[in-house]
Structures are given as structure tokens and as C-alpha cells.
Image (spheres, rainbow, N blue to C red):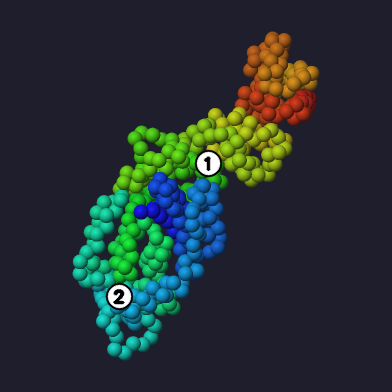
């Protein structure tokens, strides 16, 4: 059997992390078994769906690198097919027209609630209506006997008695199909073999199975993955912080780090924490996904992100860093190669936002010195130290780290000063703060012109302070 999985988001908002994890699990299962991964946009909610949300989903999938083999397919392009299936079910006697008004159904619901009964349609129109009038919907005629058995790859065997299921609406009064009908037709037509989705759909599954059986379709295998919780134990939502996939991009995470974190939310392979995409594909098994919900831990994600920043190809990290530099109004071509900046900063920076912020001075002038750093390091007489360094750096031939390092060492010896008394004022002079990579590497990245200019600027600043 050729494996075919699908990810079918509704374009009523951004791609959130719960959806991204479902997409990842579906993608991994298809890749592991040499199958196909399908992207389907379930946009039949015409009032809430938007092109902006579609774009956000596609952008999120692209950023994560979850390439789909087929699609995206849009349900709004398939209305004729849904109407055809609805007519088929009506003709077979597996569906019927229901003329019950909303008011009538609301009264029924209130009565059932008062009697502590499960709210459900009572089947009034199931066997036909003598004098049909008013608006009508189409209901699926659910079997009244027997049971639905779901051998879920995550939750195990689930058994639901058909008498617990009422006759759900499959076409609204305006003729538009409902979710439970469209998803069944799509999965059937697209040959989906494995439906991997959140466990909030468990209640829909027996109803969808009965529709599939009525259509004579091959039943897919189901795997319902547990929800993701926030630190307070409630379902992950906006109030827990970033839940949009692209917000994690904005916050400075690498896509591989987020994927690695998501795959570990509910799945594990021994004690291993870091997985390459190749390892994820090779090792992932739906049967090893936990049944219980997982808690999102931002500190763990930050740790993972730092591991990826440190271990990934600097050129790859630089490609993602370039976006963040652009967000800060910086042209990466106006300074050192970004890959070299990544090598210099990766031990210290846990996110790309941090790295971009702490690397600005390589590309553009800073407006002011950090107050505490200037007060501590720009004391009287420091201008003489910087003047000495200026002369030495101006005379140096090749501008590279080892030679620059030697100049700083020699200057400290010549001035009979502790190395820190020379290197730290120099750091503040060229960076604007007291924190940077090793001073020789910092100078090498800055280049001759920026370094000399900034030393001159610092000398003038100190003299002005002394004279004020």
C-alpha cells in the first residue's frame, strides 16, 4: 500500500504550533514510508476564511521546510463534487432532507438538557415529511445498530455504539456542505491512507467512518495526537505567548530547532534530544506518540535553538540571520560576511534576534556609548592608551586577527598595563559597549576603516568629557 497522508488546516488564522506539529507528524510518516504528503486548505467557512490566512499557512509550511507532494487543494474549488456525493447519499437512502426549524431544534435541545439527556437530533424527519415546507438541510442517516471500531495508532482501540451518534447535517440550508462531509469526500478522492490529526477530532471520526462506509470507500487508518498545553495546564493559546509558527521566526528561532522541539512534544527515542531531519524520518513512529497531552516549555525550546545555532553550518544560520538584520534596517553587505559573524557570536547568542542586536555595530555606527561601560572604561588618561593603539593599528600591514591580537598584547606590555586595561577601553571604543567576541576577532570583523575611525571618535569623546 502506498502511504498517503495529509495536512488540512482551516484558513481562519495563522499556522499555530499545534497545527505545525500535526503537519510534521504527517510529513514524517509519509517520508519514512516513501509515501506522499498532501496539503489541503479547508476553506468552506466562507465568513471566517481569508486569503491572508492561506498565505500565512503557506509561509509557515515553507519556513519549516515541510514540502508537500500534492496541493494545495482548496475545498471551495470542489463544491460540485460535494453536491454530487450528497445527491448520491440521498439516492441511496443514506441521507434525507430535514425541515426542522432552528427554533424547533433549540426547544428540543433545552428539553433534553432539562431531562439530563445528551443533546441530539431526534430523527423527526428521518423517515420523510408529509408536508415539507420552509428551509431544509440534508442529514446523513446514521446506522442505528452496531458499533464503530477505531484502531487508533496513538490511542489504541476506540469503540463507539451507533446509537450514541445522531444524524448529522451534511449540507446546510443554502446547499453548502459541512465539514464532516467535505473531509470524508476529500480523504476518499485523494486516497488518504492515514489520517493524522489532533484528538479534538476523535468525536468526528465515527461519524466520518459511517459516511465512508455508506460510500463504499476504503477506510483510512486514524492517529489522533494529544493536544499541547501551556505551562498552566490549559490548552496552548495566544495568552501563553507565541503560538503562531511565524512568530517563532520573528523571535529568532531556527526552523530546525522548532521542528526538533515539536517532534519531541509527545514523541521520544530513548533519551535523545537533538535530531536531524534525517534522523526524525528514520526513527519516527506513530505508535510511540504519547497518549497524554504535552506541555510547551519555552526554556527548553531556547536551549534547543542555541544548540542548533552552535552546531549548524554558519552559512545556513547566516541565511536566517539576514532576515533579522533586514528587520533592523541593516544591509548585510555593508559589513563583514554574515557567516563570519555567526561564527563569532554563536556561543553567546541563544536566538537570532539576540545575534542581530549584538552585531549591529559591525554594520552601522552606534549613536552613543553604553553609559555604564563608558563610565567604567573611559577614565582620564585612557585617551592616551587609545592614541597609542591608533598609531600601532595604523601601521599594521595585513588586517587579520592574529596580528591585531599581537598589537594589543604588545601595547599592554609597552604601556606597562594589565591586558584588560587596554582591551576593554578598546572594546567600548569600537563596539559602544563592554561586551563583544574576542577583541582581535571583533577588530578583524570590523575592518581597518571602521576600527580606526571609532578609536579616533572615542579619543575625542574622552577629551571632551575631561574638558567639560
Helix, strand or loop under label 1: loop
The residue depicted at 71 percent of the width and 16 percent of the height is 407
Helix, strand or loop under label 2: loop
State which quadrant residue 434 falls in.
top right
Q: Nearer the viewer, residue 457 or 21?
A: 21
Task: Establish if 216 lies above or below 417.
Answer: below
Q: Neighbour class for label 1 at 10 Å: few (<14), some, many (≥20)? A: many
Q: Position of residue 149 (x, y in %)?
A: 24, 59
Q: Position of residue 395 (x, y in %)?
A: 79, 18
**Relative to 40, 392 lies left or right:** right
State which quadrant residue 146 falls in.
bottom left
Q: Position of residue 53 (x, y in %)?
A: 53, 59
Q: Alpha-carbon distance for marks 2 and 1?
A: 50 Å
The residue depicted at 44 percent of the width and 72 percent of the height is 81
**Relative to 468, 15 lies left or right:** left
- For the view shown, which residue lies furthest in the bottom direction? 131
- Viewport quadrant of the C terminus: top right
**Relative to 102, 328 lies left or right:** right
Q: Is residue 90 visible?
A: yes
What label sits on residue 94 in the rendered view? 2
Task: Establish if 255 lies above or below 23.
Answer: above
Per the image, the residue denoted by label 1 is: 254
Q: Nearer the viewer, residue 458 or 90?
A: 90
The residue depicted at 27 percent of the width and 57 percent of the height is 150
Q: Nearer the viewer, residue 448 or 413?
A: 448
Q: Neighbour class for label 2 at 10 Å: few (<14), some, many (≥20)? A: some
Q: Is residue 120 visible?
A: no
Q: Disc 2 or disc 1, which is closer to the eye?
A: 2
Check if mark 2's residue and mark 1's residue have beta carbons within 8 Å.
no
First along the sequence among labels 2 and 1: 2
Q: Position of residue 156 (x, y in %)?
A: 26, 51
- Viewport quadrant of the N terminus: bottom left
Amino acid at each position: 500500500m502506498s502511504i498517503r497522508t495529509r495536512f488540512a488546516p482551516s484558513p481562519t488564522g495563522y499556522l499555530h504550533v499545534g497545527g505545525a506539529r500535526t503537519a510534521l507528524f504527517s510529513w514524517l510518516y509519509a517520508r519514512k514510508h516513501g509515501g506522499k504528503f498532501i496539503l489541503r486548505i479547508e476553506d468552506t467557512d466562507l465568513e471566517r476564511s481569508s486569503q491572508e490566512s492561506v498565505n500565512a499557512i503557506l509561509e509557515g509550511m515553507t519556513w519549516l521546510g515541510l514540502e508537500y507532494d500534492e496541493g494545495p487543494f482548496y475545498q471551495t474549488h470542489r463544491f460540485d463534487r460535494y453536491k454530487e456525493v450528497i445527491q448520491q447519499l440521498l439516492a441511496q437512502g443514506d441521507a434525507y432532507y430535514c425541515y426542522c426549524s432552528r427554533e424547533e431544534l433549540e426547544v428540543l435541545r433545552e428539553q433534553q438538557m432539562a431531562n439530563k439527556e445528551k443533546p441530539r437530533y431526534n430523527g423527526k424527519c428521518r423517515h420523510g415529511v408529509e408536508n415539507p415546507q420552509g428551509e431544509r438541510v440534508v442529514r446523513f442517516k446514521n446506522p442505528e445498530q452496531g458499533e464503530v471500531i477505531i484502531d487508533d495508532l496513538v490511542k489504541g482501540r476506540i469503540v463507539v455504539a451507533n446509537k450514541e451518534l445522531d444524524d448529522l447535517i451534511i449540507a446546510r440550508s443554502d446547499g453548502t456542505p459541512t465539514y464532516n462531509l467535505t473531509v470524508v469526500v476529500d480523504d476518499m478522492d485523494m486516497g488518504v491512507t492515514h489520517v493524522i490529526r489532533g484528538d479534538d477530532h476523535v468525536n468526528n471520526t465515527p461519524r466520518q467512518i459511517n459516511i465512508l462506509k455508506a460510500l463504499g470507500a476504503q477506510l483510512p487508518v486514524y492517529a489522533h495526537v494529544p493536544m499541547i498545553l501551556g505551562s498552566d495546564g490549559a490548552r496552548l493559546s495566544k495568552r501563553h505567548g507565541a503560538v503562531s509558527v511565524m512568530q517563532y521566526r520573528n523571535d529568532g528561532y531556527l526552523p530546525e530547532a522548532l521542528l526538533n522541539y515539536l517532534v519531541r512534544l509527545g514523541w521520544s527515542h530513548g533519551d535523545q534530544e537533538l535530531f536531524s531531519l534525517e534522523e526524525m524520518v528514520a526513527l519516527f513512529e506513530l505508535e510511540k506518540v504519547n497518549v497524554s497531552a504535552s506541555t510547551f516549555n519555552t526554556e527548553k525550546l531556547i536551549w534547543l535553538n542555541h544548540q542548533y545555532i552552535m552546531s549548524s553550518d554558519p552559512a545556513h544560520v547566516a541565511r536566517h540571520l539576514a532576515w533579522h538584520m533586514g528587520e533592523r534596517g541593516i544591509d548585510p553587505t555593508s559589513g563583514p560576511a554574515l557567516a563570519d559573524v555567526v561564527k563569532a557570536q554563536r556561543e553567546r547568542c541563544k536566538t537570532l534576534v539576540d545575534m542581530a542586536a549584538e552585531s549591529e555595530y559591525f554594520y552601522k555606527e552606534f549613536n552613543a556609548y553604553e553609559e555604564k561601560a563608558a563610565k567604567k572604561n573611559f577614565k582620564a588618561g585612557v585617551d592616551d592608551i587609545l592614541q597609542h593603539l591608533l598609531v600601532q593599528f595604523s601601521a599594521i600591514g595585513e588586517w587579520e586577527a592574529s596580528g591585531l591580537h599581537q598589537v594589543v598584547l604588545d601595547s599592554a606590555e609597552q604601556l606597562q598595563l594589565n591586558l584588560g586595561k587596554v582591551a576593554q577601553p578598546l572594546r567600548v571604543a569600537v563596539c559602544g559597549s563592554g561586551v563583544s567576541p574576542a577583541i582581535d576577532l571583533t577588530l578583524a570583523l570590523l575592518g581597518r576603516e571602521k576600527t580606526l575611525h571609532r578609536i579616533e571618535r572615542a579619543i575625542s569623546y574622552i577629551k571632551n568629557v575631561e574638558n567639560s
